[in-house]
């Protein structure tokens, strides 16, 4: 008809402002044919039934008929700006779709596992996408359709899909259950994430489940450590295993999503910072690595292992506690020569420096510098002693013994952990050697003071066992300084009481008992104890054992472990400290998770220094702003509580470093 009336369409219709022939025909078709009572309802019903049959798995005769009818409705609506398509098809179609997926999702989820449901939901979503393309749904239909499908299949059941199997059931396939076997269920978890990511708010359920799983596993590790079921190194290995496992979950199943990475970090921080236990355990683990674990490792392997340590270190908020424990162990390794290599030690310090800055590692680097200077000093002293012996060789009395050799590490007091243990009484020959070194050192370094740490150090002594000239056995015993002092006493008498040994050596009682027990063990019974058992009675006596024997010419006498006694250093042949104030020390292991007292004291000074520094620059500052600024400045070492900072502010006010403003008591002013 339009072709027959083409001339009229081009000339008459525009000039007379009439409706074009084609549009007029569509208008007449709509009101005459489509809106006929026996046409519209039947066609709509047939369209909806055909789509329902497709969803039920039945093959439709021809999708082209569906597409043509839907195209007709769209065209009828566009011709006279009516809502034929929306009114007569779209609203009914979306309503039936919502009801269909609501019922199907409830039914399928009640009879199948979460993993099966995810596959079914993904399949349904792809089907709807393909149908939308095949039937050429307009965007106004396609977008609401996707929203309905996502809501009914995903959003309504997201929480259930995560929690299924969260209890004792292992077969429901919920995300919480899959996390229990994360190594083998990465693909299933990724499929669930890919489904949930269509509804961003639903992904929070997955992140929450991951976070809770990490916290639960972490608390289990801490509980094992508290009960003594695992040692500190095992605890850290457990944390590293967790980190590796859940990092793979985030990288693979969550496709490296940054929000999930943040939640994982927060979960690790939550259980690791419950107390100071994690910091002490990490220091013990690093000590084990640098003494034994990295032996024979390549540079790449060393770097890889240390980077794993740094990952856990980043989670710690009490980094100053780790530093205190780490310094204790580092001192023992350096003084005892127990490190696998200097390169590994320096690599660890470099990692810490990169993470926390120069100030954090300045004392650690000072310890390395002291050891380098001490090596040079030993070489210089050996040359000096050699020259002295040559000069005095002619004047030495016949039969006089050769002076004993000592190797001294001269340490700067401010860098090294100090034991604050009073010096014991050394054998006269050792004391003479110390005096000779002191004169040599102080001649070269005027104004310094040497303080000898007799609680540290080691010695090599020659001992003769046996009862006859032909039965003598000579061994070189590698012992601690305290053990040396005890053994030398038996050159004068073969039997001594505990009180005699204590009086002559001045060794602290707990350390004296520990070192005596070490010399009475079944494997290294250098001395015989009168009483039986591990304990030492207050009136016990000790007798030299001439029957001691060993297959080894050179025998190391290890110290027994005593968790009730504070562990001191036991490395080096002799240790002297020179310099200013003593450094703080900490227990080797924080078994109760408490902050060590020296670290607590350092924190008070650190916070007060930060407050004074800030107030000196700003002159006047509100309480909340000062709290925020102090926290920001020192959070690299530890995170102070507002109450802790407030106490230090009050202390500074009492000492007249600060004062409160008269008009506002929450404003502080700096007092010059």
Image: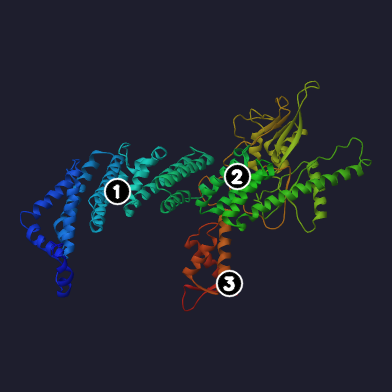
The earlier-in-sequence mark between 3 and 1 is: 1
Q: Which mark is residue 640?
A: none
The residue singled out by tag 1 in the image is 159
The residue singled out by tag 3 in the image is 616
Q: Is residue 292 visible?
A: yes
Position of residue 538 measured from the top left corner of the image (x, y, whole percent): 63, 37
Q: CA distance from mark 2 to mark 1?
A: 51 Å
Q: Nearer the viewer, residue 215 or 264?
A: 264
Q: Nearer the viewer, mark 2 or mark 1?
A: 1
Q: Nearer the viewer, residue 442 or 635?
A: 635
Q: Nearer the viewer, mark 3 or mark 1?
A: 1
Direction from residue 321 to residue 579 in the image, left or right: right
For the point 55% across and 52% down, which residue is it? 321
Eyeballing the image, is 198 above or below 663? above
The residue singled out by tag 2 in the image is 566
For label 2, count other residues whose C-alpha is less than 10 Å away and answer few (under 14), some (14-19) or many (20+).
few
Position of residue 470 measured from the top left corner of the image (x, y, whole percent): 80, 20
Position of residue 548 measured from the top left corner of the image (x, y, whole percent): 70, 26
Tell me the quarter of the picture where residue 118 sits.
top left
For label 3, count other residues whose C-alpha is less than 10 Å away and answer few (under 14), some (14-19) or many (20+).
some
Q: CA distance from mark 3 to mark 2?
A: 41 Å
The earlier-in-sequence mark between 2 and 1 is: 1
For the point 76% across and 35% down, which residue is it? 461
* Count of all numbered marks drawn on residues in the image: 3
């Amino acid at each position: 008809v339009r072709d027959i009336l083409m001339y009229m369409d081009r000339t008459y219709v525009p000039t007379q402002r009439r409706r074009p022939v084609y549009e007029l025909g569509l208008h007449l078709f709509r009101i005459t044919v489509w809106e006929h009572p026996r046409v519209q309802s039947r066609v709509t019903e047939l369209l909806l039934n055909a789509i329902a049959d497709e969803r039920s798995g039945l093959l439709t005769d021809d999708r082209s008929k569906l597409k043509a009818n839907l195209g007709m409705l769209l065209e009828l609506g566009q011709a006279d700006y009516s809502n034929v398509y929306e009114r007569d098809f779209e609203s009914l179609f979306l309503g039936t779709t919502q009801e269909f997926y609501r019922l199907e999702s409830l039914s399928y989820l009640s009879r199948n596992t979460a993993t099966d449901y995810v596959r079914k939901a993904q399949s349904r979503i792809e089907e709807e996408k393909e149908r939308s393309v095949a039937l050429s749904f307009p965007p106004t239909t396609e977008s609401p359709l996707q929203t309905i499908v996502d809501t009914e299949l995903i959003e309504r059941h997201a929480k259930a899909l995560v929690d299924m199997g969260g209890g004792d059931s292992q077969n429901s396939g919920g995300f919480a259950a899959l996390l229990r076997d994360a190594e083998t269920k990465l693909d299933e978890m990724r499929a669930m994430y890919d489904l949930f990511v269509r509804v961003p708010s639903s992904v929070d359920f997955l992140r929450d489940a991951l976070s809770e799983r990490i916290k639960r596993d972490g608390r289990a590790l801490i509980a094992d450590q508290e009960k003594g079921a695992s040692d500190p190194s095992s605890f850290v290995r457990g944390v590293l295993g967790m980190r590796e496992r859940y990092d793979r979950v985030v990288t693979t199943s969550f496709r490296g999503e940054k929000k999930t990475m943040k939640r994982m970090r927060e979960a690790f921080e939550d259980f690791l910072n419950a107390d100071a236990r994690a910091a002490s355990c990490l220091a013990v683990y690093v000590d084990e690595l640098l003494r034994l674990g990295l032996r024979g490792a390549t540079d790449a392997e060393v770097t890889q292992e240390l980077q794993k340590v740094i990952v856990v270190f980043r989670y710690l908020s009490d980094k100053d506690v780790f530093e205190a424990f780490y310094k204790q162990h580092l001192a023992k390794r350096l003084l005892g020569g127990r490190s696998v290599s200097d390169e590994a030690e320096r690599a660890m310090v470099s990692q810490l420096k990169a993470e926390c800055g120069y100030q954090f590692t300045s004392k650690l680097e000072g310890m390395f510098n002291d050891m380098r200077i001490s090596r040079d000093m030993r070489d210089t002293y050996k040359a000096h002693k050699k020259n002295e012996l040559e000069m005095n060789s002619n004047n030495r009395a016949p039969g006089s013994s050769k002076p004993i050799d000592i190797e001294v590490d001269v340490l700067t007091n401010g860098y090294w952990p100090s034991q604050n243990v009073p010096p014991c009484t050394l054998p006269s020959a050792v004391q003479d050697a110390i005096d000779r070194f002191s004169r040599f050192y102080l001649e070269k370094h005027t104004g310094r003071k040497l303080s000898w740490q007799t609680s540290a150090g080691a010695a090599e002594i020659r001992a003769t066992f046996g009862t006859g000239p032909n039965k003598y056995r000579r061994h070189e015993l590698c012992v601690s300084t305290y053990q040396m002092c005890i053994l030398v006493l038996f050159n004068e008498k073969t039997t001594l009481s505990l009180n005699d040994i204590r009086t002559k050596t001045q060794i602290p009682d707990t350390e004296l008992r520990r070192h005596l027990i070490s010399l009475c063990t079944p494997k290294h019974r250098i001395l015989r104890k009168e009483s039986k058992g591990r304990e030492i009675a207050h009136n016990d006596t000790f007798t030299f054992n001439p029957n001691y024997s060993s297959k080894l010419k050179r025998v190391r006498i290890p110290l027994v472990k005593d968790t009730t006694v504070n562990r001191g250093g036991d490395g080096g042949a002799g240790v002297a400290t020179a310099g200013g104030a003593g450094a703080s020390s900490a227990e080797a292991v924080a078994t109760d998770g408490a902050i060590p007292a020296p670290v607590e004291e350092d924190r008070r000074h650190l916070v007060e220094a930060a407050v004074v520094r800030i107030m000196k620059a700003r002159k006047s500052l509100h309480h909340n702003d000062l709290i925020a600024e102090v926290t920001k400045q020192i959070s690299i070492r530890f995170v102070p509580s507002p109450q802790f900072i407030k106490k230090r502010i009050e202390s500074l006010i009492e000492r007249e470093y600060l004062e409160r403003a008269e008009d506002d008591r929450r404003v502080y002013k700096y007092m010059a």
